[in-house]
Amino acid sequence: MSETVPVVDMQGISIAFPGVRALDGVDFRLFPGEVHALLGENGAGKSTLIKALTGVYAIDGGTITVLGTRQSFGTPAEAQAAGISTVYQEVNLCPNLSVEENILLGREPRRRGGIHWRDVRRRAQEVLEQLQLGHIDPRSILSSHSIAIQQLVAIARAMQVDARVLILDEPTSSLDADEVQQLFSVIRTLRDRGVAILFVSHFLEQVYEVSDRMTVLRNGRLVGEYLTRDLPRMGLISKMIGKELDALAELEEAESRRHPDRTQEVPFLRAEGLGRKGSVRDVTVTVHAGEILGLAGLLGSGRTETARLLFGADRADQGQLSIGGTSRTLRTPRAAIDRGIAFSSENRKEEGLIGDLSVRDNLILAMQAGKGWWRRVPRATQDKLAERFIKALDIRPSSKDSLIRDLSGGNQQKVLLARWLITDPKLLILDEPTRGIDIGAKTQIQKLISSLAADGMSVVFISAELEEVLRLSDHIAVLKDRQMVADIPNDGVTMEDVMTVIAGTTP
Amino acid sequence: MSALLKHRLTWPVLALVLLLLLNQLFRADFLSVRVQDGHLYGSLIDILRNGAPTILIALGMTLVIASRGIDLSVGAVAAIAGAISCMYIYSSPDPTSLQTAATGVAIAVVAGLLLGAWNGFLVSVIGIQPIIATLVLMTAGRGLAQLVTDGQIISVSNDSYQAIGAGFFLGLPISILIAAAAFGAAGLLTRRTALGTLIEAVGINPVASRLAGLDARTITWTVYIFSGLCAAVAGLMISSNVTAADANNAGLYIEMDAILAVVIGGTSLAGGRYSLVGTLVGALIIQTLTTTVYTLGIPPEATLVFKALVVIAVCLLQSPRARTLFGRRRPPVPAQPRVEVAA
């Protein structure tokens, strides 16, 4: 890990998309024989930087030097030819082909116009053994292996071209603990052979375990480059979030909310050790009527997964759930809705909007679904409800006949909120309801949530912005590495307290 | 004017009118309708009557396609329905009575509902892709129909049965009346209830629909059952018109005509917003084409090519991009921004 010449040296990289400066003068260096973690919150510019390096995006400013040569990659193939290989989060291989075919796909050794199969096998075997994966049969079909092995095969494929730089984008997101260790041992083998490895992960624990150096990005700008051993967890998190810890502590105290003694009441919802294999585990939360439960944790920590379990969008296979004091198993969203639970997904476009339908149709969709198709909500009622909620939530444009896909993000979010409010739920689960919307709409939505709770509705509130969670919630469930690690009552809790829990090494 | 140009039914209707005028050009009496023996006669009536099975099947197909599916089995279902009713009438002790005909029709309709339910089961419960799921019945269905008829063409002579495809009521062919009734019923069923909107919601975004609490399974099941019903009635019309059940040829390739009618009518094969009126116009265009072939005296061997040319023309007319390309009035479409090429 000596300070030699970097393999990759990116200086002052800028990339602009229409209306957004995705990267603004970012420097990035990658040394041989080193694992370098690229860190930052969602939207900080990590994947844009990777795509600049691999030739997927053209850069608008700055220089990329690879192995001492100025490069401007036009296509991913050019980057690959220069020795930069990438393994993406989802395995980008052909599951129906054999391991050896996948490793050499597109560069099979030829003989007399055909493929030299014996050579294919020999070379595949060779690269697998180099990675200490000799136990994998090169002739076996890829899909017969676990995701972890498939990921390792993808790395083998990347190494087969004799890559000098290996980029691993969220390689561990679908692996369990043992598989992660297997992956890390391969990463270390490669590092010791002098390969420069760029590692992107949301799991801080893993970053500290495997990386030697890290670069932190925030809002498309470089925050800094640090040696992993020099930067403690708390420091890293505050750099990622962009607030000094002292400043954080001084931030506006959460409005003093009343916390009546609830222990005697039957909670609206109670989950005990709720979990689902491969998703999230140990979710133990209690939500009373009129209470706001905040879910805190880094991206990928299992916030959304928790919400989906509580809504029946995914079926829990561990633990118990009781609603109104009665034990229930939620198999479908329909079952949850019938019990008075509503869920607004963080993924507005894919999981919320019916883009080609009008604002009115979108507004009444959940109510209509509840009534069944044969009992149509009368047009007059539809119009009345639409007008009422367009006015109440200040949805613009105020025409109920516009297609919802033509609205801005904030207004779409309001429509989705209203879709559920119309059904008058007892518990409203909001996953990132304020993400990607302008500040005005954001404040409106926050106020709305507070007043709904004051009127007796329970709310589960998820946001990547800790401040927001602290300001609104009565108590906060903290998730870390897809596990719930704490439930903190929000009386005088500071961001620092929560971040300590998030950063803590032991749950 | 520009709003009219943009309306999605403008171009199909224009194509239909042009086709009709073309026919009028070659045969002066084409557009005239005359009364004979108290019945309406004329080429327009023929187009409606012969097009009735296609209209019916295309109706069912529209809803299936709107829900992101497709039903390839409609031709086979039509053949089965015809085979069942004819076989029942043929082998009953009283093959000429109204009651026999009615029972035969009822059995065939129930069979159509069941076959539709089978398709819906494969798609919504088992989760097979619609094109594959209905392909099963498309191929197996012809075999079923042959089993029913024992491989023979079953001829029946039952006046009541024959009336379905060839009879008249109030001066109009009964098949037209049936198709019109089905069209009206489908319109009411989907637009007076919430079914239409919910089908569209499932077709546009199945994931969001599920999270909004929609029971997509019931919706899917409903559209396939409706499609099966339409196909069965169409099959009755076809077999009644020729007073025989032909397991091999009844409704052959009618699924293609129906899909084409839906597409010409402006409903996207990707699912979502649909137009029943559009489908009606589409089905009429297809039937008018067949008539045009005879009017113009196009040799039979060139018929399919001619049809294909007209269909391509109609589809191009509907495509905004093609209109810009050929129209050259608007500025060229700006170059697409660089698309991300995931390795």
Image: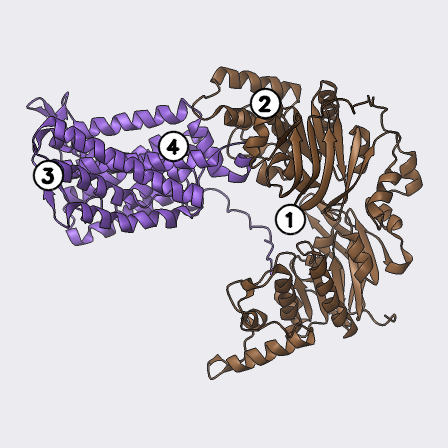
Q: Nearer the viewer, mark 4 or mark 1?
A: 1
Q: Which residue is mark 1?
A: A277
Disc 2 is placed on an element classified as: loop
Would you say B188 lies left or right of A188 here? left
Q: Nearer the viewer, mark 2 or mark 1?
A: 1
**Three-letter code for the amino acid on which mark 1 is drawn:** Lys
Query: Which chain's residue wears label 1?
Result: A
Q: How far separated are the C-alphas under marks 4 and 1?
A: 44 Å
Label 4 resides on the chain identified as: B
Contact, CB < 8 Å: mark 4 with mark 2?
A: no
Which amino acid, by three-letter code, is at mark 4?
A: Ser
Q: Please identify the residue farthest to the bottom as the structure is shown.
A: A112
Q: Position of residue B241 (x, y in %)?
A: 14, 36
Q: Is residue A51 visible?
A: yes
Give the residue type that dot 3 points to.
Answer: Ser
Q: Position of residue B200 (x, y in %)?
A: 45, 34
Q: Quadrant of the C terminus of chain B?
A: bottom right
Q: Which chain can be seen in brown? A: A
Helix, strand or loop status at disc 4: loop
Amino acid carrying label 2: it is Thr
Give coordinates of residue B43: x percent, y percent: 15, 33
